[in-house]
Amino acid sequence: MKKFRSYDLLLIDISIGLREQKKIERVCDKQARRILGQPRGLSVFTVPSRFAIYCNTYK
């Protein structure tokens, strides 16, 4: 972290938690996109579902 000592604020962009259902978007992601507006809202990525994480194939 010596590399970042000159900054007052350091933000890390990572999703916390997974979707429980396959095709339903998380409310927190929708709200974040709305609050950030354009173009920053585009940086809120849709997280995969828990089901997708534990699949053995892409099908």
Image (spheres, rainbow, N blue to C red):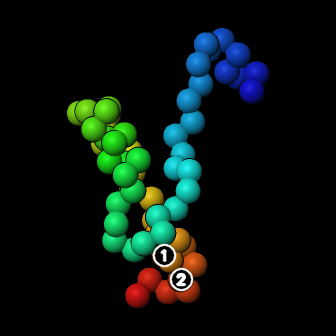
Q: Residue furthest front?
A: 27
The answer for how far apart the CA atoms under marks 1 and 2 are is 5 Å
The circle drawn on residue 52 is: 1
Hey, what amino acid is under mark 1? Ala
Q: Quadrant of the N terminus?
A: top right
Name the residue located 55 percent from the left edge and 86 percent from the top edge.
56
Tell me the residue that label 2 is attached to.
55
| Residue 44 place in picture, x, y as percent | 38, 45
Q: Classify mark 1: helix, strand or loop.
A: helix
| Residue 4 place in picture, x, y as percent | 67, 21
**Labelled pair 1, 2 in contact (Cβ < 8 Å):** yes
* Residue 21 relative to residue 6: left or right: left
Q: Is residue 12 above or below residue 45?
A: above
Q: Classify mark 2: helix, strand or loop.
A: loop
**How many labels were placed on the picture?**
2
Is residue 39 visible in this depiction of the protein? Answer: no
| Residue 8 place in picture, x, y as percent | 61, 13
